[in-house]
């Protein structure tokens, strides 16, 4: 299990090592990270890595577990429960928590977000556990609320794609922050940016989900173009002579 309460996190030396490792892994990924840079930044000797973590891979696991645990702490399992709140309000809370767990108030993206970007480009054996313990639970909690908003008649594929669209909007603002700050200065950053982004993503997503729900209640009639495409894809006519049998 990647995310767990570890006594290592309560050890001051380990915390310094993990803090230094977070930045090194975030900047260079697992393969490019240098243990020497980590121990120098943490103010410890090389032997401390093997003593506390068993080596570079163990340190990487501990670092991911610590950072993912922080992200999940902002995304508790009961966050999407009704508790007298509307589905719209719960969706907003989930989106805010998603942003909060992977973002920071500084100009640079937080370590976990940058490490996940490295994992997306060059997966390590830890990616499977990250998906199961961090990404899947977050998406499923959002998906439950999307399903409620879209209605029981909405097809599963539409609900799933709407959920992924919400996550995609969040990830754009998180991972694209350096570029977006250059294109639209002051829009993504700032003290109130997280709430502003959460409100924008919520409004945009609710409109899209409403469209899905309306489409299921009142399916659009086939257009002339769609009928033309359908006719072009019709199966061939049976031969004139003899009996045609489909297989």
Image (cartoon, rainbow, N blue to C red):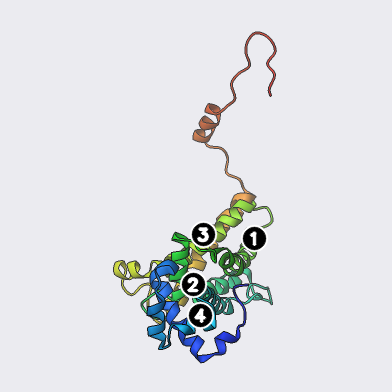
Element class at badge 4: helix
Label 1 belongs to which residue?
A: 147
Q: Position of residue 147 (x, y in %)?
A: 64, 60
In terms of secondary structure, where does tag 3 sit?
helix
Front residue of 76/185: it is 76
Q: What residue sits right under mark 3 in the picture?
A: 165
Query: Which of pointers 2 and 4 indicates the residue nearer the eye?
Result: 4
The disc, 1 or 4, on the residue closer to the chain's N-terminal end is 4
Q: Nearer the viewer, mark 3 or mark 2?
A: 3
- How far across and down, in percent of the image, does residue 245 sit? 70, 19
Quick one: quadrant of the N terminus?
bottom right
Q: Is residue 207 visible?
A: yes
Foreground label between 1 and 3? 3
The disc placed on residue 50 is: 4
Real-space Cα distance between discs 3 and 2? 14 Å
Vertical placement of 79 versus 164: above or below?
A: below
Looking at the image, which residue is at 47% across and 83% down? 47
């Amino acid at each position: 299990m990647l995310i767990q309460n570890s006594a290592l996190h309560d050890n001051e030396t380990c915390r310094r090592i993990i803090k230094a490792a977070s930045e090194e892994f975030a900047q260079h990924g697992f393969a490019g990270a240098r243990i020497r840079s980590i121990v120098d930044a943490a103010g410890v000797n090389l032997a401390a890595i093997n003593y506390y973590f068993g080596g570079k891979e163990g340190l990487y696991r501990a670092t991911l577990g610590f950072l993912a645990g922080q992200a999940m702490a902002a995304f508790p399992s009961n966050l999407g429960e009704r508790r007298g709140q509307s589905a719209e309000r719960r969706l907003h809370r989930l989106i805010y928590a998603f942003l909060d767990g992977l973002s920071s108030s500084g100009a640079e993206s937080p370590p976990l977000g940058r490490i996940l970007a490295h994992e997306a480009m060059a997966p390590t054996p830890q990616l499977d556990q990250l998906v199961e313990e961090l990404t899947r639970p977050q998406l499923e909690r959002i998906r439950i609320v999307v399903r409620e908003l879209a209605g029981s008649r909405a097809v599963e594929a539409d609900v799933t794609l709407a959920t992924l669209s919400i996550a995609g909007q969040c990830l754009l603002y998180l991972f694209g922050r350096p570029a977006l700050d250059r294109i639209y200065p002051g829009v993504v950053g700032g003290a109130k940016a997280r709430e502003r982004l959460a409100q924008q993503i919520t409004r945009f997503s609710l409109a899209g989900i409403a469209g899905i729900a309306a489409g299921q209640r009142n399916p659009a009639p086939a257009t002339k173009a769609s009928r033309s495409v359908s006719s072009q894809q019709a199966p061939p006519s049976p031969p004139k002579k003899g009996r045609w049998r489909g297989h």
